[in-house]
Structure formats: structure tokens, C-alpha cells
Image (cartoon, helix red, strand yellow):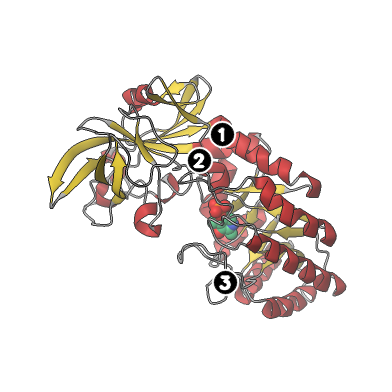
């Protein structure tokens, strides 16, 4: 959380006071630290330098144009999972020739768009998709570069809704089927197999799953090469965990330790698709307490930000560190459990759903109507998953660089909420 610090009892993003930003832009407000984003990217680039990595920032974690532009200028490439995300990458002025495209349901239109953008490769998730890429590539008179997405049947021990590399979920293919598809590629002049892909799930807070995946990758690369495929790339996806609670996140160098030797052994270059690792702790959500309500033996802090802004607690039971922007008690290292001088509250949003909460039975310094609250570690899967549910406009986003702050998305208006619709 080094982009965000308390100074003289006030929360700052780099050199800018969060209270000042809220006075200017209102709440709920997403605030990002540019230097935190860049240092997380650099950390990965450095940790894996030995295998000449192409770091493809995962657009789905946070695809705001201002963020994509920042990443592109720092030498990041991109991992996309839809035509819309590829459009965002293009709009941000990034080079599309280093983009990788995953996802189980790519439509012909999306495949065509990606071929026209000359992306680096498709991460192919099924035989039908491979056929579709060949078909579209033929119609354009081009060759689709593909990597096969393997399901290595590794349990990454994440939340049931975020594990992807275990047998029985919709992503990738088992190794035997992938081998059959590799045969098919050899016979098709409109396809070229240049790599293999695995993405195990997210967030992963141990290195073992990556080590197991990297070992499998070496075997598969050998097999494909022996059959005549020009395999240059191992893509181990994203999923590196971060510190949501305390210091549970591992540095990128720990993951590198178990991955790099195997990639070297295979004689491949490495692609990674980190999203959360880069964006997660580079962003916060600032909200305002609308009401404090006592009911049924509980105290509720009702804030203006809700599951429409940040759905992670409702969707994944995820834990976010919360603390006031101008706290009466300094934030301790450990915010779980009882804290002296604090009261036990549920922090909830305004949305008409019981699952609209940010924290339950959490100890927070006394807060009143009008006070500002910060939700930390909200940079990834925050605004990216936000919606207009309950006709709440999308919140504004600010990118801070040292002493300056730039509005990278203004708040949506009521008129814009209905601008695509007609009552005629
Ligand atoms: C979601 C996703 C990622 C990014 O995961 P993080 O946990 O944000 O690093 C990378 N690759 C694929 C294919 C994904 O679906």
C-alpha cells in the first residue's frame, strides 16, 4: 500500500490528500497511484528478466484508458478477454501486436478484429474455437497464431469462483485433447502453434501451483516441438496474489524463483498476465458515510459506495481493509478482530440487496454521517466490475502522480444513464 499513506492524521495518495480530491470530485471516488502501478510492473519485469518476459497486463482487472495508457508507456503489453478490451487497448494508443487474447467464447467478429490488429496470439480454449480462428484467418488470407490453453488439473486453492486450472471447469483443455488439436494445427496452413498457455486461478498466495504448472509446461513444449511446432512461448497467465489483509502477498521474485528455471530449461520466452498484482494495491475507493443506523443489535455504517461500485465482497466473500480517511485512531497493522477505541460495525452500501456490504462485524474508529471512508486494495476488479444497478451512475476515477492528480474518468450523469434508451 505504499502509494497510500497516512500523514498528520490524513490519508494521502502519493503527495495528494484524499480529502482534497473528494472535495473536488465527490464520492464514491476511485483513486489510483501511478507510481505504485509502475513499480509493481517493474518488479515483475525485473524478477523475470532472465527469460525476457512479455508482461501482458490483464485488462480485465482494470481497463480504464488512463491506466492502460500508463502501462503502455511503461512498456507493458496486454492480455484481453474480449473484443471490447482489445478496443480499449487500441484506444489507449498501445501496440496491439504484443496482445494475447484468452476467453472461452470468442465470437467470429472478435476473432476477425484481433486478426486485423495482428495480435501476438490467441489462447485457444477449445477445438471449435480453433476451427473458428482457422476459418476467419482463411477469409482474411492470414495466419492465426495460437497457443493452446491447457487445463493442468492443478488446485490453486483459491475461492471456488476464481479457480480455473482444475479439471471440470470451463477453461482450457486437458493435455491429451490439446495434443490432438496440435496435430490439427499442423495440417492447417492458416494456423500456427507458437506457445502454450495456462492460467491457474486467482489470487494465488503460494508458489507451488506455478512450479507444478511450469514443470508440466516443459514436458508439453518438448512434445510439441518433437512434432514440428515452432514453440517459443510459455504463458503462465496471471493470478499472483496481493496483500488484502496484512502482508500475505509474496513478492514477484518468489514466483520467479520457481518459474524461471523451467522456462529456461524449455528454451522459451515467458508471457505473464498479471492484473491484480499490478492494479490491486494501486487503487482505493473513497466513500462517504450517508447514515449511521442502529438496528437489531447492530450498528450499520451506510455509505454512498455499494456493490454497484465494488462487487467483490458480495461475489467472492472477499476481504478489504477499510479505514477512515481522517481517522480518530491510527490504522493498526492488523485490522481484523477487536481494536481499542473502535466500534463494531457493518459497512454497507445503498443498494437494495442484502449482499450489498463491504465488511461485517468490523472494528472501525467512531464515524459519523458525512465522514469519509477508504476501501483499500480496490484497484483491481473494482471499477472493472462496476455496474449501473439501482441506476447508480459510474463513479469518477483519478490518477495521481506525485503532487498532481488527473481525472481519468468523470462521473457519469443521469442523462448518460438513459442515453442508449428510448421510451417511444
Ligand atoms: C483473470 C485473468 C488473468 C488475470 O488474473 P489476475 O489475478 O488479475 O492476475 C490473467 N489471465 C487470464 C486468462 C485471466 O482470465
Whether tag 1 and tag 2 are in contact, CB under 8 A, the answer is yes
Q: Can residue 87 be seen in this view?
A: no
Q: Is residue 372 above or below residue 239?
A: above
Ligand 1 occupies quarter: bottom right
Q: In this view, does 177 lie above or below 397?
A: below
Q: Which residue is drawn at 53% across and 37% down?
A: 67
Q: Is 332 on the left or on the right of 86, as rendered? A: left
10 Å crowding of disc 2: few (<14), some (14-19), many (20+): many
Front residue of 181 and 268? 268
The circle on residue 166 is 3
Task: Give whichever of discs 3 and 2 has the lower sequence position.
Answer: 3
Pointer 2 residue: 281
In 3D space, how far apart are the residues under numbered discs 1 and 2 (Cα atoms)? Answer: 8 Å
User: Callout 3: helix, strand or loop?
Assistant: loop
Pointer 1 residue: 36
Front residue of 368 and 402? 368
Q: Residue at x 32, y 44 (%)?
A: 338
Q: Where is residue 118 in the image (x, y as percent from the top left)?
A: 69, 53
Whether tag 3 and tag 1 are in contact, CB under 8 A, the answer is no
Task: Give whichever of discs 3 and 1 has the lower sequence position.
Answer: 1
The circle on residue 224 is none
User: Callout 1: helix, strand or loop?
Assistant: helix
Q: Is mark 2 within 8 Å of ligand 1?
A: no
Q: Where is residue 409 in the image (x, y as percent from the top left)?
A: 42, 34
10 Å crowding of disc 3: few (<14), some (14-19), many (20+): some
In 3D space, how far apart are the residues under numbered discs 3 and 1 (Cα atoms)? Answer: 32 Å
Q: Can residue 253 be seen in this view?
A: yes
Q: Where is residue 65 in the image (x, y as percent from the top left)?
A: 52, 39
Q: Residue at x 79, y 76 (%)?
A: 187
User: Callout 2: helix, strand or loop?
Assistant: helix
Amino acid at each position: 500500500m505504499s502509494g497510500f499513506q497516512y500523514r498528520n492524521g490524513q490519508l494521502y495518495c502519493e503527495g495528494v490528500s484524499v480529502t482534497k480530491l473528494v472535495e473536488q470530485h465527490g464520492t464514491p471516488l476511485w483513486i489510483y497511484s501511478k507510481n505504485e502501478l509502475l513499480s509493481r510492473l517493474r518488479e515483475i519485469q525485473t524478477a523475470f528478466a532472465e527469460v525476457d518476459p512479455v508482461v501482458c497486463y490483464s485488462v480485465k482487472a482494470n481497463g480504464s484508458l488512463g491506466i492502460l495508457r500508463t502501462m503502455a508507456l511503461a512498456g507493458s503489453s496486454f492480455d484481453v478477454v474480449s473484443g471490447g478490451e482489445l478496443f480499449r487497448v487500441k484506444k489507449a494508443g498501445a501496440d496491439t501486436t504484443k496482445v494475447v487474447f484468452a476467453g472461452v467464447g470468442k465470437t467470429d467478429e472478435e476473432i476477425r478484429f484481433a486478426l486485423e490488429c495482428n495480435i501476438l496470439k490467441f489462447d485457444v480454449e477449445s477445438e471449435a474455437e480453433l476451427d473458428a480462428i482457422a476459418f476467419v484467418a482463411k477469409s482474411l488470407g492470414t495466419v492465426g497464431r495460437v497457443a493452446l490453453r491447457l487445463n493442468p488439473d492443478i488446485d490453486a486453492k483459491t475461492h471456488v469462483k476464481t479457480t480455473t486450472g482444475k479439471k471440470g471447469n470451463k477453461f482450457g483443455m486437458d493435455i491429451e485433447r490439446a495434443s490432438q488439436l496440435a496435430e490439427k494445427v499442423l495440417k492447417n496452413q492458416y494456423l500456427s502453434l507458437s506457445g502454450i498457455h495456462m492460467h491457474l486461478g486467482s489470487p494465488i498466495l503460494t508458489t507451488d501451483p506455478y512450479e507444478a504448472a511450469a514443470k508440466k509446461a516443459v514436458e508439453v513444449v518438448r512434445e510439441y516441438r518433437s512434432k514440428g511446432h515452432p514453440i517459443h512461448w510459455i504463458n503462465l497467465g496471471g493470478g499472483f496474489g496481493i496483500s488484502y489483509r496484512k502482508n500475505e502477498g509474496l513478492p514477484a521474485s518468489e514466483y520467479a524463483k520457481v518459474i524461471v528455471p523451467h522456462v529456461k530449461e524449455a528454451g522459451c520466452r515467458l508471457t505473464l498476465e498479471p492484473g491484480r498484482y499490478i492494479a490491486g494495491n494501486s487503487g482505493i475507493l473513497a466513500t462517504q458515510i450517508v447514515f449511521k443506523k442502529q438496528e437489531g443489535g447492530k450498528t450499520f455504517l451506510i455509505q454512498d459506495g455499494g456493490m454497484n461500485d465494488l462487487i467483490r465482497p458480495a461475489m467472492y466473500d472477499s476481504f478489504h481493509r477499510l479505514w477512515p480517511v481522517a481517522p480518530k485512531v491510527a490504522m493498526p497493522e492488523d485490522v481484523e478482530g477487536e481494536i481499542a477505541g473502535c466500534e463494531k460495525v457493518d459497512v454497507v452500501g445503498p443498494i437494495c440487496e442484502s449482499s450489498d456490504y463491504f465488511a461485517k462485524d468490523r472494528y472501525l474508529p467512531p464515524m459519523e454521517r458525512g465522514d469519509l471512508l477508504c476501501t483499500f486494495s480496490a484497484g483491481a476488479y473494482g471499477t472493472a466490475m462496476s455496474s449501473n444497478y439501482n441506476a447508480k451512475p459510474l463513479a469518477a476515477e483519478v490518477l495521481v502522480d506525485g503532487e498532481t492528480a488527473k481525472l481519468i474518468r468523470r462521473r457519469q450523469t443521469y442523462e448518460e444513464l438513459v442515453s442508449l434508451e428510448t421510451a417511444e
